[in-house]
Image (spheres, rainbow, N blue to C red):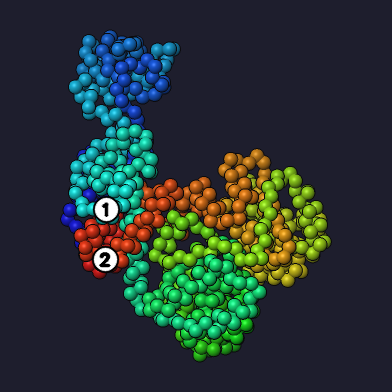
């Protein structure tokens, strides 16, 4: 119970204290993550059964649940063993039968005595035109009618747990709910017409119709908001805690940045200028920067990152840029080299390939501060890599780069600022859930000169036409990617493998024209094949999705994606972003195998209609859900019991601004509302966050 306020103890007691829950039920519930009365209260009904009293079963929507008052008639015990026990009953308009299997005559006579009135509720079906209610769910005296809710909640079940047990144990848990002070900002609560916390729980478990089950119903929205608010408070406290650790003040004079800007053939977009300003501002403060630079394929993240690295150099320090793979590290190196030359700054590459004397020389130059900017793979984490004065770490492609690596990098430069770049546009609600502790800069404009990519849908039956089109393009000196879904032909799958497609295209286009890369090749072979394509020695590159991230071949202007319907939207968008980087008009051909499912059709047409990665990611979120979008295992997304990130995206944004506002006014949560917020953190099991305030 370390530190948890006493008023909350009943909610965190053992489940077995609740009415009807024994060791077996507790074990079943435990397997679904329900370990205390509090968890049970946050397990809301997902549906309801309408138990409103009717006059008669006549005219009811059958088969369906009906609740009706009846006069009990004759009992018909079964004629043979195992037969049905039938009881005739009559409502205000019609006769029907109650049917029991394994009916015990004495018990039935006691439960439903002939001549008396009872209320029965259960599923009614027609058999040979006669309505029958098989095994009524409820049999009540007429004066007990108010015991039956008009709408009975239906809960998710597991193992040996029944609806009746859920209703009983939740009612008992409800009786333990304390009155807690309000943690929501009063104007927010009034504006949304939200109930108090305890009232919201009561209402959520006693829905008064199907509207009450919707995420926008006031009781549910309030409970979801509480979860999101607790999550954002935790992220906010983590952010404040990190800011307390001293960073370095890196204030540049702009001399190097201006040289680069002068050498560019174009002007940066408004979005790039804003992002550069945000980053420069952050770097000039003593708190450590922790910023996410989110930009779609080709939005110009590299320039923004390089400006940040130059700020570190202008301030007398060094910068490092990290990429997840060697290919990408080399690519960054090639992209940055001309910029570094225009600024007159020494830039070096460090990967796992550097060995012996060459590596030693690089490390010495780095330790003396002669290398100003280092580009590398995770090789820069090795113990013998020492910087003279590391000011900024730029990390590319966040999702392959966990929190642990961020910390490792922090050790290399005690107060180094961190800038994380991602080319995966994430819908705002997920960005807030996953990166809520970071400041976010979004590049939402395309730099001038990026040509739109024409996207077309083609059935695989037209593959002959596609190959003809390709042959013509190749003779005109153009280059193309051909993406295949799987690496080897497997008996169970009709997906054409990369190897088979490679052989077929070579036969048609010529031996030297076609290259191949896939995930199962040795790294050196893969790099060599990529290098030949980059140099224009091969014109067509057959590939699996290894080319999804980062590869830059301006001359490549055709992207063929085979069996596009089995790829995710974000993946297709990333692949398409590999073309449209040069002078030529580019096309992306999405080849699908008919018949297309409705969702397959929606994915491909969304892609055809828009190149806006953020719009695409919103559709992806609607279609796949938050967990699939980032892959739950490594998404770092919190698991909410009530809140739904897909349908309550707007609430997350409100929760973040409220949490930040509260922490700005009351960083240690000492005010009355701050103390209430602290109660919310305990309630949501955010003990970590409470530890960060440094008080119980």
Q: Earlier in the sequence, mark 2 or mark 1?
A: 1
Task: Using the rendered view, name the quadrant where residue 150 is placed.
Answer: top left
Q: Distance between the residues labelled 2 and 1?
A: 16 Å
Q: In this view, does 517 lie above or below 379?
A: above
The residue lying at 65 percent from left, 63 percent from top is 450
Nearer to us in this view, 106 or 644: 644
Indicate the position of residue 87 as horizontal and vertical percent values. Answer: 30, 13
Query: Mark 2 = which residue?
Result: 666
The residue lying at 72 percent from left, 54 percent from top is 500
Indicate the position of residue 153 as horizontal and vertical percent values. Answer: 32, 35
Indicate the position of residue 229 as horizontal and vertical percent values. Answer: 33, 56
Task: Report helix, strand or loop for mark 1.
Answer: helix
Nearer to us in this view, 438 or 572: 438
Mark closer to the observer (2, 1): 1
Q: In this view, does 626 lie above or below 554?
A: above
Task: Using the rendered view, name the quadrant where residue 158 is placed.
Answer: top left
Indicate the position of residue 62 as horizontal and vertical percent values. Answer: 41, 21
């Amino acid at each position: 119970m370390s530190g948890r306020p006493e008023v909350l103890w009943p909610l965190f007691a053992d489940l077995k204290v609740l009415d009807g829950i024994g060791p077996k039920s507790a074990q079943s519930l435990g397997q679904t993550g329900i370990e205390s009365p509090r968890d049970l209260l946050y397990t809301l009904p997902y549906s309801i059964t309408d138990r409103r009293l009717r006059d008669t079963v006549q005219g009811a929507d059958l088969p369906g649940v009906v609740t009706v008052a009846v006069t009990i008639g004759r009992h018909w015990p079964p004629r043979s063993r195992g037969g049905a026990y039938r009881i005739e009953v009559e409502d205000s308009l019609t006769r029907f039968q109650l049917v029991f299997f394994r009916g015990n005559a004495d018990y039935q006579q006691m439960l439903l005595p002939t001549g008396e009135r009872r209320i029965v509720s259960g599923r009614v079906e027609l058999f040979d035109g006669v309505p029958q209610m098989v095994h009524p769910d409820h049999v009540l005296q007429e004066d007990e009618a108010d015991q039956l809710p008009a709408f009975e909640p239906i809960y998710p079940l597991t193992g040996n747990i029944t609806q009746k047990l859920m209703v009983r144990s939740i009612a008992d848990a409800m009786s333990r709910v304390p009155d807690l002070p309000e943690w929501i900002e009063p104007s927010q609560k009034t504006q949304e017409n939200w109930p108090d916390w305890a009232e919201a729980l009561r209402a959520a478990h006693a829905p008064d119709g199907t509207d009450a089950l919707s995420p926008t119903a006031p009781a549910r929205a309030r409970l979801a908001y509480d979860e999101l608010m607790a999550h954002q408070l935790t992220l906010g406290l983590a952010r404040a805690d990190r800011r307390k650790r001293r960073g370095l003040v890196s204030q540049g004079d702009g001399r190097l940045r201006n040289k680069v800007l002068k050498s560019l053939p174009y002007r940066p977009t408004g979005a790039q200028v804003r992002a550069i300003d945000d980053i420069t501002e952050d770097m000039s403060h003593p708190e450590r920067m922790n910023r996410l630079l989110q930009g779609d394929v080709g939005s110009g993240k590299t320039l923004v990152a390089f400006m940040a690295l130059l700020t570190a150099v202008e301030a007398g320090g060094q910068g490092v840029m990290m990429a997840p793979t060697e290919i990408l590290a080399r690519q960054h190196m090639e992209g940055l080299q001309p910029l570094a030359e225009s600024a007159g700054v020494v830039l070096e590459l460090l990967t796992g390939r550097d060995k012996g004397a060459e590596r030693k020389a690089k490390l010495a130059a780095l330790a003396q501060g002669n290398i100003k900017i280092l580009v590398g793979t995770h090789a820069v984490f090795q113990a013998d890599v020492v910087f003279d004065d590391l000011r900024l770490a730029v990390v590319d492609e966040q999702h392959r780069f966990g929190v642990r690596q961020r910390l490792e990098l922090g050790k290399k430069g005690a107060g180094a600022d961190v800038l994380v770049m991602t080319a995966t546009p994430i819908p705002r609600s997920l960005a807030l859930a996953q990166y809520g502790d970071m400041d976010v800069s979004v590049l939402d404009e395309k730099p001038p000169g990026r040509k739109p990519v024409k996207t077309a849908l083609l059935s695989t039956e037209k593959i002959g036409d596609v190959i003809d089109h390709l042959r013509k393009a190749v003779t005109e000196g153009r280059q193309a990617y051909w993406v295949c879904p799987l690496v080897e032909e497997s008996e169970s799958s009709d997906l054409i493998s990369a190897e088979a497609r490679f052989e077929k295209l070579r036969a048609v286009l010529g031996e030297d024209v076609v290259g191949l890369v896939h995930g199962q090749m040795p790294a050196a072979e893969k790099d060599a094949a990529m290098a030949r394509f980059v140099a224009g020695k091969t014109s067509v590159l057959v590939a699996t999705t290894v080319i999804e991230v980062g590869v830059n071949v301006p001359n490549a202007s055709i992207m063929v994606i085979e069996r596009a319907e089995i790829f995710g939207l974000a993946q297709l968008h990333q692949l398409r972003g590999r073309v449209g980087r040069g002078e030529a008009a580019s096309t992306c051909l999405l080849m699908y195998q008919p018949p297309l499912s409705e969702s397959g059709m929606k994915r491909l047409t969304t892609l055809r209609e828009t190149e806006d990665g953020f719009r695409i990611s919103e559709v992806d979120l609607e279609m796949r859900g938050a967990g699939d979008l980032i892959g739950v295992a490594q998404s770092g997304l919190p698991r909410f019991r009530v809140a739904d990130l897909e349908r309550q995206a707007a609430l997350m944004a409100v929760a973040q601004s409220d949490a930040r506002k509260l922490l700005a006014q009351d960083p240690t949560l000492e005010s009355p509302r701050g103390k209430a917020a602290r109660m919310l953190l305990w309630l949501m099991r955010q003990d970590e966050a409470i530890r960060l305030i440094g008080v119980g």
